[in-house]
Image (spheres, helix red, strand yellow):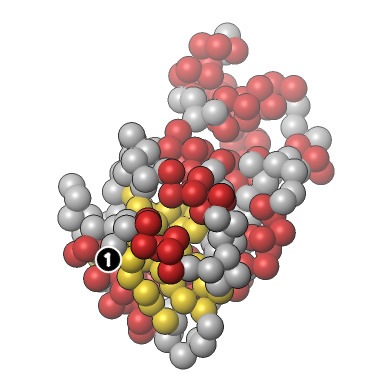
Amino acid sequence: MNYGETIHICGIDPVVRTSLKSILEKTDYRVRLHDDAGRFFEAVEPEARGCVLAYVDMPDLIGLDFLETAKEHRIELPIIVITGQANVRGAIQVMKEGAYDLLELPLSEEKLVAAVQQAMTRRADFRAYRGRPRLTPGRLSTLTSRENDVLAGLVEGKLNKVIAHELGISARTVETHRSHIMTKMRVKSVADLVRISLGAPRHDPSRMVPPAARQMSVEISDSRR
C-alpha cells in the first residue's frame, strides 16, 4: 500500500467511477470516491498527496470549473481529466486550466494505470511547472517565422484548413510545417505539443511505469454515451 498517496475520483458517472476504482486498487494505491466536486473540496486538504481523476464533458466543457476551483483552493494534486469525446480545442482548454493529463474513454487498463503512476512519480515536477512561464525558448527559437505562425494556430485549436486559409497557404503545407514543428519540439503528438507550448509537463515514455507484466484488454465503457 502506498500510504499517504490517494487517488481521488470525482465527477465521473457512478458505473465508470466504480470500474476505475476496481482497476486502480490493484496498484496498491488508496482510492477514494467523491460523488461531486463540492464533497471533494470539503474532504481534501491543499497539501494532500496523490492525484485526481475528474470528468469534463466535451465539447461543451461541462465540469471545467472543477479545475478553476482546484486552483482557488490551492490544490496541488495533479488532475487527470477524463472525457468521453476529446477534441483539440477542449484539450487545449483543460491544459490551460491546469490539468496534468487528458484521457479519453473508452480507456484501456494499461493506459489508465500508466497515466496515474506517472502523475504520482512526477508530482514534484508538476508543482514546479505550474509556476513556470508557458514557453520553452530553447526549442521555440529553432522554429521559423512560418512555423511559429502555424504553432500559434495549433495552440488555439484551429484546424489545418483554417490555419491554411488565414496564412494563405495550402493545408498540405500546414501539415508539413506541423511535422517539422513536432520534430523540432521533440514531441510525437499534438497533445504533447500543446503541453510544451503551455509550459505543462509532457509524457516521457521512458519514465512511465507499466503495469506488472500483463497486457490487459479490459476497457472501460463511457456510460454517458
Relative to 102, say whether 127 is above or below.
below
Query: Where is residue 62 shown, x and y percent of the image?
Result: 34, 41
Relative to 142, say whether 225 is above or below.
below
* Residue 176 visible from this viewpoint: no
Residue 15: which quarter of the image? bottom left
Q: Residues within 10 Å of mark 1 (few under 14, many from 20)?
A: many
Relative to 19, say whether 191 is above or below.
above
Q: Which residue is labeled 1 in the image? A: 17
Name the residue furthest top: 168
Identified at 70% across, 42% down, the residue is: 134
Please name whichever residue, 66 or 89, is drawn nearer the observer in this view of the structure.
66
Identified at 46% across, 25% down, the residue is: 159
Q: Amino acid at mark 1?
A: Arg
- Which secondary structure, mark 1? helix
Query: Where is residue 99 shown, x and y percent of the image?
Result: 52, 51
Query: Where is residue 205 shown, x and y percent of the image?
Result: 57, 65
Query: Where is residue 172 shown, x and y percent of the image?
Result: 51, 23
Identified at 53% across, 83% down, the residue is: 4
Relative to 57, say whether 154 is above or below.
above
So how many labels did they put on this image? 1
Identified at 37% across, 57% down, the residue is: 38
